[in-house]
Amino acid sequence: MTRTIIPFGPQHPVLPEPIHLMLTLDDEVITEAVPAFGFVHRGLEKLVEIRDFHQMIYVVERICGICSMLHAMCYCQGIEEMMGIETPPRARFLRVIWSELHRMHSHLLWLGLFADSFGFESLFMQFWKIREKILDIDEATTGNRIIVSVNVIGGVRKDLTLEQTRGILSELKSVETELKRLETTILNDYTVQNRTVGKGVLTAKQAYELGLVGPTLRASGVMQDARMLKYAAFDDIAFTPVVETDGDCYARCKVRFREVFQSIDLIRQAIGKLPNGEIAVKVKGRPDGEVTSRVEQPRGEVFYYIRANGTKHLERLRVRTPTFANVPALLTMLPGAGLSDVPVIVLSIDPCISCTER
Amino acid sequence: MFEKILTRARMRSPWMLHFDCGSCNGCDIEVLACLTPVYDVERFGVVNTGNPMHADILLVTGTVNHRNRNVLRNLYDQMPGPKVVVAIGACGLTGGIFRQAWNVVGGVDRVIPVDVYVPGCPAKPEAIIDGVVMGLEKFMEKQHVDIS
């Protein structure tokens, strides 16, 4: 049998982002997949030498547009820990609200793209229609649709008024009803099941040993979520990670779909318990020392290592993003799969290339 | 006669190709949001295509770096003329917040000629649609040049 090598990407209709995979095929079955990176690399960790530690918030927000709020939150929590700043309780709850809104819009985006990856165009449109409601909330409360830029060191920049919280709750109610209507399609439709059930299976042991994070890991039955570290206001909010056990693309889809509902619940809890008071404290002095900070992003756990030397510029900033941890899963899942399943499997880890390469 | 029909047909159904050229995803998902029901760019006949050889409009988001400049150049060369390039977002225009980063070449116009610049970080879908419609006017001008 002759071997065929097919390039997948860097520009591909299914992927909005440039990732390059060299797929070695034996007939229609993939025997080897070799990824190539670097199409989005900007080298922004090095920008710490030019921008001071306050300005770096705006740079880390632009590591990834989809989970920008969570990047900034992780960075700010790291610097706050280093400088010994106690953030006001209201700020911590507001951070939870905005971060869960971000998780919702990211998961809805993914559910749409996932439907698109197996050619279910109308479902893609439906999910993105619902997602616009979340973006409207973001725009009404922070002034921007995607890069909300609410985090500062010591708290948040914007406050929610009573009307705004009521508005969020009523919008979430309509989002919930519309999502319930799509539940039968995305989870029970036989075309969806034919394309996803049993595709790209990872056992719990494999997933754990590959060091996966986020929904990809939880879909294999490992209960691990950085929100269990109880950062921000998660110590006051009841939270249990969503776990599925099958480990295939369908299970990953189910985890993310259920996490949208979980995020709605978390926002409701956070708004219910929202304390009164300050939203930010004044920051004095400069950071010194080294610290690691972890936050659960929509795609998994993001890890920041920050080292400072008492000047206004940080010495080193290192980011490990969830997709970087999840790419080994891709290389385990792809060999043995058919060529037509490649887009489904690649999307099932929710790749975010601009996070990975920075 | 034939050319008139061709011009009209091209104007009413421009096909677009989107390339993420080192963007943070913010503008990319806004480009995709343009295709979805709330903004629905299809009412102008714009269809998203994955094939550069079918495309009339190239939407580029993000900064150019040393690795993807060849990919961008390649995509541009594969598109049949007349073609219009729309650069989207602060990064696509000048390099934006990343312009001092070591792997960044700069805006899209360092590599290929750009016809329309859409500012914003990220650019809003309304602005992107406006950019595409402005691109269509340019497209019309270019077409006349090509025909005559």
Image: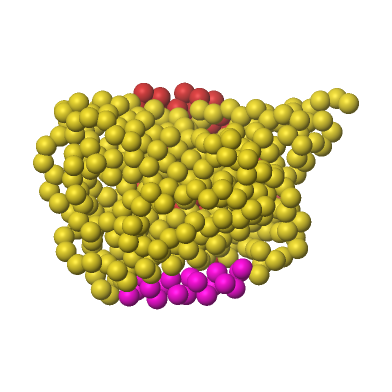
Chain colours: A yellow, B red
Q: Which residue is at a point 16% across and 28% down the rendered structure image?
A: A310
Position of A327 relative to A244 (above/below): above
Q: Is residue A49 left or right of residue A210?
A: left
Magenta stretch encompasses residue A290: no
Q: Give the position of the N terminus of chain A as an image quadrant.
A: top right
Q: Which residue is at a point 84% across and 33% down the rendered structure image?
A: A27
Q: Which residues are magenta?
A: A166-183
Q: Nearer the viewer, residue A224 or B144?
A: A224
Report which quarter residue A6 is drawn in: top right
Q: Main secondary structure of the magenta part?
A: helix
Q: Which residue is at a point 14% across and 44% down the rendered structure image?
A: A283
Image x and y of residue A47, in percent? 30, 29
Report which quarter residue A79 is drawn in: top left
Position of A182 relative to A78 (above/below): below
Position of A275 relative to B103 (above/below): below
Asked whether residue A22 is in view, the answer is yes
Q: Give the position of the C terminus of chain A as an image quadrant.
A: top left
Image x and y of residue A162, in percent? 25, 73
Q: Residue furthest right?
A: A1
Magenta stretch encompasses residue A170: yes
Image x and y of residue A158, in percent? 23, 59
